[in-house]
Amino acid sequence: MSRRPMMAGNWKMNNTYGEAVVLAQEISNRYEPRWSDRMDVVVCPPYIDLKPVSTVLEFDKSHIAVGAQNVYWEASGAYTGEISVPMLKEVGCTYCIVGHSERRGLFGETNEDVNRKVKALIGGGISPIICVGESLAVREEGTTDEFVCAQVKAAFAGLADHQAAKCVVAYEPIWAIGTGRTATPEQAEAVCAAIRATVAEMFGDQVAENMRVLYGGSMNPGNVEGLMAQPNIDGGLIGGAALKADSFEQLVKACF
Ligand code: 13P
């Protein structure tokens, strides 16, 4: 595979400051230079843990990137409770998850919000990890590809080719998140291929060929190999299995 694999841990709302330092240190202790030679490893802790986690990784010279789980599109101002792109940048973030289904479903984030966040991130030099994925109802209705590809089109709307090229897409079927029910490699591959085809329609074959498309949803050391063997799956966005250094290490090693 010519694309550089990526394994990203989404810690969600887990780990206090102290716990985050311990987990970052445990992951850092397992780091080997071949990780960063061959792939991108990313950890996405809660906002308040970003600085301590990036400090641990920098101190150890572990080339593991740090990402946020969300962002607001304005750079500064009267937006109580929000965090901006320049704030993320200064604490060492190089990636940021946007449009996670938990943000869409629990916090009302729309396709338009996702698009604004993507533009703000690219403008500020942070790579968006754009999450898309269908509910069980949509899957059972048989409209998964249309639904997911519409999310992709909305997230990328108005971008130039070179801007789109900075993005990563994560396909996360909602019914597979935190449920232990993973998409089969064939199901995941079919949607990831449709996502890549949509990117090709919008930005051409080269941008599509180079774009990383990740799978997320109950990915773990037991099912990672079948998923990673698929030609259109370039890595994982991991929830539960990223909260233990051992299982995260196994997922990283499955990308070699
Ligand atoms: P789980 O790996 O816990 O299913 O979570 C996936 C996810 O939502 C990652 O963003």
Image (cartoon, helix red, strand yellow):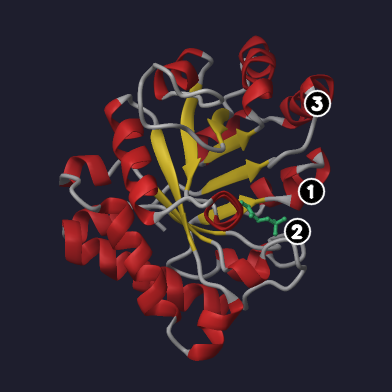
User: In screen coordinates, is 156 left or right of 44?
Assistant: left
Q: Position of residue 5 (x, y in %)?
A: 49, 49
Between the C-alphas of marks 3 and 1, the distance is 20 Å
**Mark 1: amino acid:** Ser
User: In the rendered image of this protein, does residue 123 appear above or below residue 245?
Assistant: above
Q: In this view, which residue lies farthest toward the bottom?
A: 141
Mark 1 sits on what residue? 247
11 and 247: which one is in front?
A: 11
Chain-order first, disc 2 or disc 1 = 2
User: In the rendered image of this protein, does residue 32 appear above or below residue 57?
Assistant: below
Check residue 221 in the rendering and tell me which mark sits there, or answer none: 2
Q: Position of residue 240 (x, y in %)?
A: 76, 51
Count residues near mark 2 (Cα–Cα under 10 Å), then give few for <14, some for 14-19, many for 20+.
Answer: some
Check residue 16 in the rendering and tell me which mark sits there, or answer none: 3
**Mark 3: amino acid:** Thr
Residue ID at (68%, 61%): 219
